[in-house]
Image: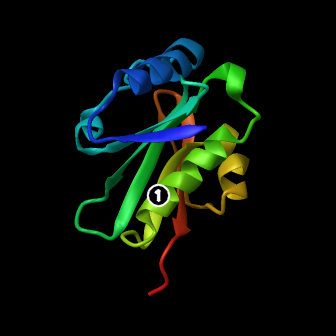
Amino acid sequence: MEIKRYDSLPQEAKDIREKVFVEEQGFKEEFDAADGVSVHLVAFDCGKPVATCRFYRKADTASFVLGRIAVVKECRGRHIGARLIAYAEDMLKNEADFILIHAQTRVRSFYEKQGYTAFGEEDFEEDCQHVWMKKRLRRG
């Protein structure tokens, strides 16, 4: 598996997010202003784009928000999402005190396995229940 970094939203990431979040899960507001200020990662398997995520610095902090983590249906269960998150964490290990994720509650346990802890109240994004989660990268 190869992971590529992009400083703007690549078509491969758009296609994966459309497939996963819009077609499968029914979200309507998939793309937002954060896409313009994010670093985007795309995982390729045998040259085919199979997963994506993005991250951006939370304003005036040493924390980053990691999100829009999506793996195409036919590649789920192969730990690609976990590898993509680990790759992003490795990129941020010298810059970020914390990584924050606004996770769908139905996949909360997946993020807990990656070392994330829920905090705060659950909320809704387009009628889908979410919870904020965080992971400390640097001690300080």
Residue 78 at x, y percent in the picture: 75, 36
Residue 32 at x, y percent in the picture: 29, 31
Looking at the rendered image, the quarter that the C terminus falls into is: bottom left
Residue at figure coordinates x 37%, y 65% from the top left: 63
Picture layout, residue 2 above or below residue 132: above
Looking at the rendered image, the quarter that the N terminus falls into is: top right
Foreground residue among 132 and 16: 16
Foreground residue among 59 and 92: 92
Q: Can the viewer see residue 89?
A: yes
Residue at figure coordinates x 23%, y 37% from the top left: 36
Residue 8 at x, y percent in the picture: 26, 35
- List the residue tagged with mark 1: 100
Residue 21 at x, y percent in the picture: 51, 23
Residue at figure coordinates x 62%, y 41% from the top left: 81
Instruction: Give the number of marks.
Output: 1
Foreground residue among 82 and 29: 82
Q: Residue furthest top?
A: 23
Picture layout, residue 12 above or below residue 40: above
Query: For numbered disc 1, what is the local secondary structure?
Result: strand
Q: Can the viewer see residue 105?
A: no
Foreground residue among 136 and 86: 86
- Say which quarter of the image contains residue 119: bottom right
Picture layout, residue 98 above or below residue 138: above
Please give left or right for residue 18 compared with residue 32 in the image: right
- Amino acid found under the numbered disc labelled 1: Leu
Residue at figure coordinates x 61%, y 25% from the top left: 46
